[in-house]
Image: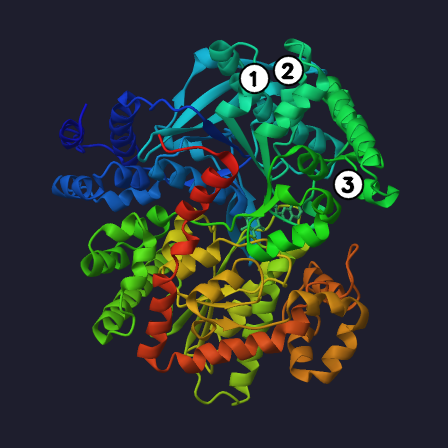
Amino acid sequence: MNREKLIEELRAISVEGKDVKEIYIEISQTCMKYITETKRKRTVKNAYYFSIEFLMGRAIYDNLLKLGILDDVKRIFAKKGFDLNSLEEVEDAALGNGGLGRLAACFLDSAAAQGYPVHGYGIRYRYGLFRQRFANGEQVEEDDDWLKWGDPWSERKESETRLIRFADMPPVKAVPYDIPVLGKTNNTLRLFQAEGSAEAEEISKYLYPADDTEEGKLLRIRQEYFFTAVAIGELIDQFTCKNGKNFKQFSEFNSIQLNDTHPVFAIAEFIRILTTVHGVPFYRALNYARDTFNYTNHTILPEALECWDEKLIEKILPEIAQILKSLHVYSQRKWRREGCSQEEIEDMSLLKNGRFSMANTAVFVAKKINGVAEIHSEIIKQKLFRTAYKYSPDKFTNVTNGVTPRRWLRLCNEELAKLYDSNLGLRWRFDMTELTEINTGNKHTIEEFRNIKTIKKEQLARYIEQREGIRLLPNAIYASQIKRLHEYKRQLMTAFAILYLYYELKDGNLPDFTPTVFIFGAKAAKSYRRAKSIIKYINEIAELVNGDQEVNHLLQVVFVQNYDVSYAEKIIPGTDASLQVSTAGYEASGTGNMKFMMNGAVTVGTLDGANIEIKEAAGEHNNYIFGAKVEEIEALADTYNPMQYVEQHPKVKRVADTLIDGTFEDDAGGLEELHTALFKGASWHKPDNYAVLFDLESYVDALLRVNRDYKDNRLFAKKQLVNATHSAFFSSDRAIETYAKEIWKIVKA
Ligand code: 26V
């Protein structure tokens, strides 16, 4: 089938008497017929991206764009009286939590777009990330039944089913579902579904099941082993079919990227099959693994670095436990031989206090280890993995994250893409560095950009009104913080900043204030109590501020429900100021920050993650940097006492007091607990562990700088445009090119 034939078949679809779902399925299936006829190009070496999350979002518009028929199909269906925008009802495939899963999706997109043979391996969860709504300002979670829309974009490959064995249950069937990833090459995302018994089905039922109980932990281990073991089994069989048992060559054909530590069992499974099935000696199998696997670290938060009890792994995967132990023994011997001190050996140890450190295992074996932004990669080298870095500095590298300009610019902001087209032709689509040729000093261009921003803000306002029933203030600054809810990301600090501004306005201290709308979008992990309290608190603040006649023409707060990829596609282009305010040192990279920049929002941010590189690319004067730097945050540990601090900063005290002084209802005691965490400490954390109070006034100051600068509309629009036109570095095309050349050593098909 060729493109013309495809369009013809799409034109032949009748919409008469059909509902949105039926039309959606028919369009998708027609495209799939066309796509699956296109054969994969043969390549020598492929890369495989192993990830427990792929946050793909909605497929249909993206695929139509890649087939080059989006505009045609819109027109064809408009003529039939069917608005293609109706397909926005189709829910996202949300098989991921946030940045890590969305990065995996952007990387697959960029690899295909550039013709690199990179395929994804993951899990086909029955239920993705929960759907969120608010009841009385509190988060309520519901199962995400994404399959109710059917799954026309994947192909079940029953005949390629493999069996995965756990010691305590019958063999589990792993059935592959292939999702095409379109571009210059057609790559594949292969997700496995667990079948065979009710017990088996549990394995691929939920994304990130709670792992605070032993049962939860076992399930998580099963998930991790399940998808990596099928993938490894497949890759080894494919290899031996073509090349026999000359495993020395395995890495000449295959490179495997471990997206965080969740897929680290792949290493053990690889060694297990080579040693037990193919009779390769252990040390050789290890060497082949060393040539094949690479590891990306995505966080330095201790609570997120996986360690699994030896006993648990022994119970369900005895052979794998044995191999992990052998790796441990082998590594200890090696380090002793190399003259490492006892302390150093302990620091790098794969097995600590009866628990396997998945990160240390990955670091020991991987050929390349990378962080996801310059500062993060430095922290990894100097702190998290400092001993390993001391002995193998060449293993460590940085690949700053990126985001796909197809979804995050062309699809979500076609107005801006058209402005680029009319200024530069189509070249920029293939090389975003061309965007710097746009004359950002040109009055006419700035005006055009400003109009586009206004259009996108209006579209956003309409969308939010539809979804949330809230009408946004027009002619206001739109400032957005959209990301997973976590204390280190400091949504609480934004909440305090809003209250700070609120009281300043009430007190008449801000006579010249430009109206500002704060937009939040975030899901809190089901069991993360303080994160949920922060949602409740922000919703309380929204009620107070939005209901106050004295200020509600100047200040507005909206927390949207069920924030997801598709919501992000609306919020990002309609935002003026992107809030990226994590405690310095904690946000590995951030990728939302890049999406905002690409759509021409200024960054109000700390010197953390990729914010630093954004500031460098677009110029400090075009962004609003504030807050303590990493070294300053570290120094706080010895000197900082939040109780004393607020005594000297009464306005900070005033807002923090609202957690306990009856300003807001707090029946469940969640707000009080936030107050305790700030002033007395909580869990294993010291008081105000994330420096929320400490950075607050410098944050407010940055927001007020935005507020002042915005008055000169043209100058502000210019800052935004400079950001947009200097965002090439943050395209995942650049990131993938770096992985391909420096880590995977693969060439374009
Ligand atoms: C996971 C968990 C799990 C349990 C408790 C707390 C906690 C805190 C953080 C995490 C994050 C896991 C890894 C992750 O998603 N990292 C994100 O990866 C993005 C892509 O590289 C990056 O842009 C974000 O900065 C980073 O947080």
Gap in Å between the C-alphas at discs 3 and 2? 26 Å
**For residue 749, what is the image quadrant?**
top left
Q: In the image, which is nearer the foreground, mark 3 or mark 1?
A: 3
Whether label 2 lies within 8 Å of ligand 1 gets the answer no
How many residues crowd mark 2 within 10 Å: few (<14), some (14–19), many (20+)?
some
Mark identifier at residue 348: 3
Residue occupying the point 53% across, 37% down: 53
Mark identifier at residue 557: none
Gap in Å between the C-alphas at discs 2 and 1? 8 Å
Can I make out residue 230 in this image? no
Mark identifier at residue 233: 1
What amino acid is labelled 2 in the image?
Ile
Q: Secondary structure at mark 2?
A: helix
Which comes sooner in the sequence, label 3 or label 2? 2
How many residues crowd mark 1 within 10 Å: few (<14), some (14–19), many (20+)?
some
**For residue 677, what is the image quadrant?**
bottom right
What amino acid is labelled 3 in the image?
Met
Residue occupying the point 75% across, 23% down: 321
Q: Secondary structure at mark 3?
A: helix
